[in-house]
Image (cartoon, rainbow, N blue to C red):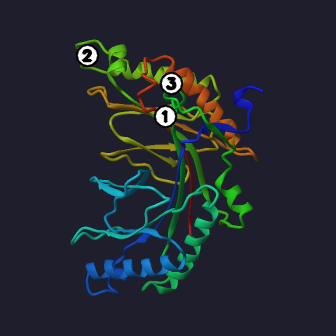
Amino acid sequence: MSVSRQKKVYLPTATRKNQYITIGFPLTDEYLNAYSDLETCYDEFSKLVYQLAEKQELYNVHVVTTDKLPMVRYHSEAYCLTTDEQLRFFYNPAHHEANRLHSVAGFRARKLRIVFLATGNDLRSNSAEFHSHVKKFIAELKPLLPVKNVPIKVRDHQHISYDFFAKAKGLKETYGYKLRAVDSRYHRRHCELPENVSTLNYVTINIPVDRRIKKQLLANDTTDFTSVYKKVCDKFIEATKSKQLNRVAVVANGKIPLVRNSKYEQLTSTNEFQMVGFDPHAESPEPICHWDANKLVDVFRFVIVAGKSDETDEGYGRFMNQVEEAIRVFTNEFDIDKEHADVILRFHQHISYKA
């Protein structure tokens, strides 16, 4: 059986797993008028959140009133970085717990947002239970809010990440994953979801532009990088098409790709995020390429989105094998220092719905 036909994908045992769930609703005048001032609103809301979260055994909970987008990554130390548009959480799910309000004095948020970071050791096995706890939290929170029937949006983010060249660094051990769809896993664990769930499954790949790649791609006096980016895009599209992967994007403008379902969401890029929209039901969309010809980026960022045809009862193992084959073909075109460069693959599984 060819690798691309296998139902499991074998990933390094050092693979990292993350899960976090965000819920949010608009901070309207009606809601704010229930409090004496903005700070009181934030403080009382956060206290209520922590109290209910404790009851549901949710131990790493953040209230965000800055309208910044949460991004979550694994790290051995727990800390939070903020930019103009992002709130980046770094933590180890096995060890770190927190209750924290992220606010700016005098700033009125468009939305009140809660971020639940999964804790424990077996995040993927316990993902349905974690989601069930958040559902119970929402059910308890709603009647206690000063405004009834607020429109709450739930987003469940799960990803597993690993170094594509782990074997070249001596990490030989692997583990087989079927990568089942979230709704299928949840149904088996009796965590039922509403019918109108939006799902998105995709892979991001980051390739650092180090000295060896610069030496291969650039002439000494290059100031217009159009030909460099076009070559990278063409090679990537060629490699992915050869493995029947048709929903792809390349981002080389210094922004972080933010993947959304274009069928349901309005897409507007910002200074830090490049919105990339895909409809998983569309069979052969045009490749998406964004670059800035005036500067050379530090990282080439790539996206490969799974379509409905890539989902099987067994999961996305076959899709990930196709992705790995395509990335192997693509990276062989470049002089990458496999023993030292971190080429991170991240398989994302997102669901969202209105609670």
- Quadrant the N terminus occupies: top right
Which corner quadrant of the image does residue 126 belong to?
A: bottom right
Q: CA distance from mark 3 to mark 1?
A: 9 Å
Q: Nearer the viewer, residue 12 or 324?
A: 12
Mark 3 vs 1, N-terminal side: 3
Q: Secondary structure at mark 1?
A: strand
Amino acid type, mark 3: Phe
Marks 3 and 1: CB-CB under 8 Å?
Answer: no
Position of 66 with respect to 323 (left or right) is: left
Amino acid type of the residue tagged 2 in the rendering: Thr
Q: CA distance from mark 2 to mark 1?
A: 24 Å
Vertical side of 38 occupied by 253: above or below: above
Residue 249 tag number: 1
Say whether disc 2 or disc 1 marks the residue closer to the N-terminus.
2
Residue behind mark 3:
236
Split into 4 quadrants, where in the image is the C terminus?
Answer: bottom right
Few, some or many residues within 10 Å of mark 3 (<14, 14–19, 20+)? many
Q: What element does badge 2 sit on? A: loop
Q: Name the residue rendered at 35%, 40% in the picture.
A: 255
Camera-side residue of 100 and 267: 100
CA gap, disc 3 and disc 2: 22 Å
- Percent coordinates x, y for residue 205 in the rendering: 48, 35
Q: Position of residue 319 (x, y in %)?
A: 65, 37
Q: Is residue 104 left or right of residue 190?
A: left
**Rendered residue at 64%/63% (across/down):** 128
For label 2, the residue is 222
The quadrant holding residue 229 is top left
Nearer-N-terminus badge (3/2): 2
In this rendering, the answer to whether 259 lies above or below 49 is above
Asked if disc 3 and disc 2 are in contact, CB closer than 8 Å, the reply is no
